[in-house]
Amino acid sequence: MFIYHTLLINLITGGESLEETINGCYGMPTIGEKFPKLIVQTTAGRLKLPEHFKGKWFVLFSHPADFTPVCTTEFVAFQKRYKDFKKLNCELIGLSIDQVFSHIKWKEWIKDNLKVKIEFPIIADDMGDVACELGMIHPEKGNNTVRAVFVVDPKGIIRAIIYYPQEVGRNMDEILRLVKALQTADKGYATPANWPNNELVKDEVIIPPASDEKTAAKRPKEYDCFDWWLCHKKLKK
């Protein structure tokens, strides 16, 4: 509804056309950019992002609506892994185009009926401003948010973005794995497919390829390699 509210204002004031309004809303930040500075209303009060999570990783995820079946299963799944995220110095924050009282009542329902207390905040983006800013609304999928995931590092940099359609619930273990993999990348390594359960190197990490002939010649002597450009090693715990 917020799109039509914005359009009405624009028409009255002689502002943007429908096409301009839609195109402006469906832009999105990209990996490697600074997370935009936002002031958001949440179930924990008004928060400044990314400042509120300064020095921490955080996962911001959108859901289409409160009191919906798939979203309810997702919130339970995120909460059951919340301690695992916190062990990685990573916080969670949800979002949907609902008012804060809806979020509060939904959290109460989940606690009373499913015996799970949701401990992380939920953004009440009732006018859709945040969803618009972050490109969470895709025109061919309606006016509510798709299932977007933004992984942001302690410096406020967007490190990963994932989109799921409304009809498909997310894999929270994959999101947890993604945070672990990004933190491993910050140590100078890459992670292989399905890490830490890769078919070739198991839980080991990939050494960045050599950038000169001298280093390439030394690689097989220093690491386990299939060739000088595909070397791997086990991380120290």
Image (tube, rainbow, N blue to C red):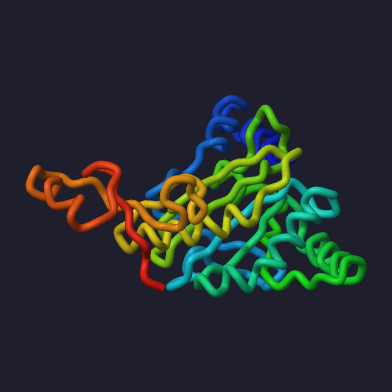
Nearer the observer, 101 or 219: 219
Q: Quadrant of residue 92?
A: bottom right
The residue at 59%/41% (across/down) is: 163
User: In the shown orientation, is residue 134 left or right of residue 94?
Assistant: left
From the top left corner, tell me how far across and down residue 234 is, in percent: 36, 62
Position of 7 relative to 54 (above/below)? above
From the top left corner, tell me how far across and down residue 10 is, in percent: 62, 34
User: In the shown orientation, is residue 71 left or right of residue 114?
Assistant: left
The residue at 66%/59% (across/down) is: 94
Position of 223 relative to 13 (above/below)? below
Which residue is most to the right? 113
The quadrant in which the C terminus is found is bottom left
Position of 106 relative to 220 (above/below)? below
User: In the shown orientation, is residue 93 left or right of residue 193?
Assistant: right
From the top left corner, tell me how far across and down residue 44 is, in percent: 68, 73
Nearer the observer, 31 or 133: 31
The quadrant in which the N terminus is found is top right
User: In the shown orientation, is residue 213 left or right of residue 17?
Assistant: left
From the top left corner, tell me how far across and down residue 78 is, in percent: 69, 62
Q: Quadrant of residue 47?
A: bottom right
Nearer the observer, 154 or 83: 83
Nearer the observer, 156 or 214: 214
